[in-house]
Image: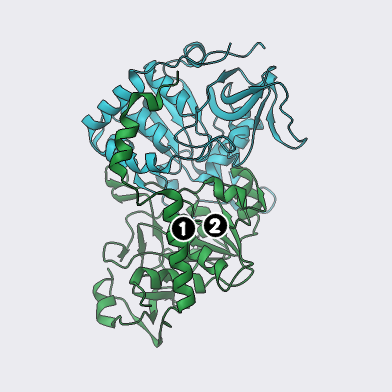
Chain colours: A cyan, B green
Amino acid sequence: MSNLLTLSDAIRIHLHHGDCVALEGFTHLIPFAAGHEIIRQEKRDLTLVRMTPDVIFDQMIGMGCAKRLVFSWGGNPGVGSLHRLRDAVEKHFPHPIEIDERSHAAMTVSYTAAAAGLPCGLMRGFLGSDLAQHNPNIKFIDCPFTGERLAAVPAIRPDVAIIHAQRADRAGNVHLWGIIGVQKEIALAAKKVLVTVEEIVDDLEAPSNACVLPAWVVTAVCHVPGGAAPSYAHGYYDRDNRFYQAWDEVSRDRDTFQRWMRDNVMDTVSVRGGA
Amino acid sequence: MVATPSEVMTVVAARMLQEGTVCFVGIGIPSKAANLARLTHAPNAVLIYESGTIGTRPTVLPLSIGDGELAVTADTVVSTSEIFSYWLQGGRVEVGFLGAAQVDRYANLNSTVIGNYQAPKVRLPGAGGAPEIAAQAKETLIIINHDRRKLVEKVDFITSAGYLDGGDSRERAGLKAGGPTAVITDLCVLRPESQTRELVVTQLHPGVTRERVAEATGWDVRFAKDLSQTQVPSDLELSTLRELERQTALAHSIDAEDKTHLNRIDSKTEVTRP
């Protein structure tokens, strides 16, 4: 199995300061362990890409990894604000952050365009919305056939995409299921793909139409059980809703946040990881 | 049983969802109202969440838009790109159910910033799926708590277009589909007037006066000539809603002591992956 790496090696070898990196997973299968490893390795000046930044990007932004954020909905799902994201945008703490803000539909169009090798994606959207006025990455064109005014957004082609999946086989083929979000799209959009998985199995036993990423499009697979917690992995463990609620209090205060990150992320070591 | 203002809002919103309707549902009160409809008068309403779950029938309300419960109880689960392209943009959605931080006189929605975009006073979560839902569903229902800071003359930022500057400005901007048909609050229901498209109060909830509504609204709000009274929530509606909330709280352990949990996640063993 050629593409199996430890998580720390995968991040060290494949992600560099200043890279554009997408961590996807729509509420489900959020690659938390990989995000924590990026924080531990103190990667800097990253362009972070995620439809829903969620707690993982709140942590990465608060720890100073991000130069730029590309996103469409930046809240704590079911709870409220992401306080570290807000602090960066409102008070420029720990430093100013550039924002490229789109809608969910526009993010998916940007990913599918990149996956399809196109420079931009088209959609019906943003008419009457102020977002287009503030984001130079949202423009309008007229359909050459019907004349309809359509929105165009540039493809998002990250240097690295990171996703979490339920399992991989020993050859490095990856299988995910449940709410599959935009993982396939972002994997095929990116130049490199890192996948953390719950389990390595002999046979994926995937039905013929299952969401499978063949080993030859995956740069590295890392065996990281629990790697999506406190989000969830369908069939393995549930979303830790109480963590998301408790995060509101932890993240509100800069010092409490720093202390929590030191105790729970910085001073911990990612030991497990395949090979 | 006596309903709270928030319960009345949820029940009134649920009543607007007709049996068999295909509905794109936002998280929070919209999701609560849509599921209440499904559990009472509209068992065959088709609920779609932007996480890609189609025809979902959750037994408890999801805390997040992508809870596993939504996937397990769905007819099918598709990718997020497919839900927005084939299903929403493709014109399959009849009703969009949305919330927002602010709604204005012409039913435009703000969920982006309070204050200036470049230097916001409050940075809100942002658009999510709302702009396209508001543009592409055949009609949109908006649910929001009635407060002067929320029902404003003009939103600070148009995240999702309602009727823009009123009159035919929505159509002139190139937006084809229907737009908002009702704003449901904890005090009343407002609907866009046919020509001006200005929101006017068409229905008052039990015990609510015109003065109270006027006071809680950020513009000089008008009342329809045929102003009606909201029918008091029935025992069935209320007991179904309360049971749904009870089951939801149990499932999410929302009422458990968060402090205990905070200690638990503070311990190193919890997140170290040995």
Left or right: A236, with B262 as reference point: right
Quadrant hosting residue B3 = bottom left
* Image spot of residue B245 (x, y percent): 43, 61
Give left or right: position of A249 versus B53: left
| Distance in Å between CA atoms under marks 1 and 2 | 8 Å
- The answer to which quarter of the image holds residue A66 is top left
SS at badge 2? loop
Chain where mark 1 sits: B
Residue pointed to by mark 2: B59
Furthest residue toward right: A208
Q: Write the residue at 58% across / 65% down.
A: B138
Please name the residue shown 60% across and 65% down the image. Answer: B94
Image spot of residue B9 (x, y percent): 40, 70
> Is residue A232 shown above or below B183?
above
Please give the residue where the numbered disc 1 appears in the rendered image.
B247
Question: Element under label 1?
Answer: helix
Instruction: Give the residue type that dot 1 points to.
Output: Gln
> B274 or B130: which is nearer to us?
B274
Q: Is residue B201 visible?
A: yes
Q: Earlier in the sequence, mark 1 or mark 2?
A: 2
Q: Nearer the viewer, residue A20 or A147?
A: A20
Residue B12 in view of the camera: no
> For the point 38% across and 39% down, which residue is it?
A243
Q: Amino acid at mark 2?
A: Thr
